[in-house]
Image (cartoon, rainbow, N blue to C red):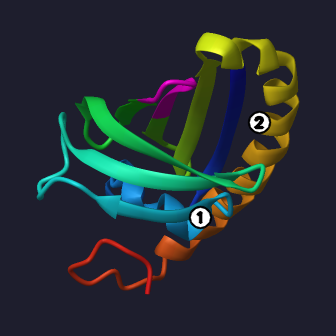
């Protein structure tokens, strides 16, 4: 199992940060390892909403279909995806900070399946590097939301 956790404080209002992050198709905007992401289900976002996320991993395109399995707006969303070689669980929480800020936390778990389980030690090392890049992008995107006009799309322009 590989796990990556990060947490940071942002001036972005909690509802804005949560709405943006729970629409997991936005990963293409903040995770440099994601080459493409899209909504698979119509609005509103909630339990059962699905997103296709295609990552680049070791030169291969890896598609995953994420589905929201827990949703408590504007505080917590849990998304899961799996294919024949991996199961991914992402938990994102948004909590009010003491100074009016929003504390965003992300907990990502990758569990290799089948023969891929043999790669678990290497996967943990790679996941740390991938997670660090994604965390920097996540923070920059959420902070940018504090002054951004998202219009009707819910995406950064």
**Residue drawn 26% across the image and 77% down it:** 153
Stretch in magenta = 82-91
Give the class, few, some or many, for how many residues have Cα within 10 Å of label 2's Cα (few <14, many ≥20): some
Q: Residue 140 appears at what percent x and percent y?
A: 65, 68
Q: Residue 128 appears at what percent x and percent y?
A: 82, 37
Main SS type for the magenta part?
strand
Horizontal relation, residue 47 to residue 15: left or right: left
The numbered mark at residue 109 is none
Residue under pointer 2: 127
Q: Residue 40 appears at what percent x and percent y?
A: 23, 55
Residue under pointer 1: 30
Horizontal relation, residue 18 to residue 47: left or right: right
Q: Earlier in the sequence, mark 2 or mark 1?
A: 1
Asked whether residue 18 is in view, the answer is: no
Vertical placement of residue 8 versus 125, above or below: below
Could you say whether the residue bearing mark 1 is in a helix, strand or loop?
Answer: helix
Residue 86 covered by magenta stretch: yes
């Amino acid at each position: 199992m590989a796990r990556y956790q990060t947490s940071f404080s942002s001036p972005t209002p909690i509802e804005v940060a949560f709405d943006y992050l729970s629409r997991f198709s936005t990963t293409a905007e903040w995770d440099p390892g994601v080459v493409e992401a899209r909504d698979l289900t119509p609005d509103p976002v909630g339990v059962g909403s699905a997103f296709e996320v295609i990552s680049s991993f070791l030169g291969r395109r890896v598609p995953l279909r994420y589905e929201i399995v827990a949703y408590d707006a504007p505080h917590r969303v849990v998304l899961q995806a799996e294919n024949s070689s991996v199961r991914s669980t992402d938990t994102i929480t948004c909590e009010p900070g003491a100074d009016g800020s929003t504390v965003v936390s992300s907990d990502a778990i990758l569990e290799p399946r089948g023969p891929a389980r043999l790669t678990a030690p290497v996967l943990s090392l790679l996941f740390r590097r991938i997670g660090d890049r994604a965390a920097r992008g996540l923070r920059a995107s959420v902070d940018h939301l504090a002054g951004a006009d998202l219009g009707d799309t819910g995406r950064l322009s």
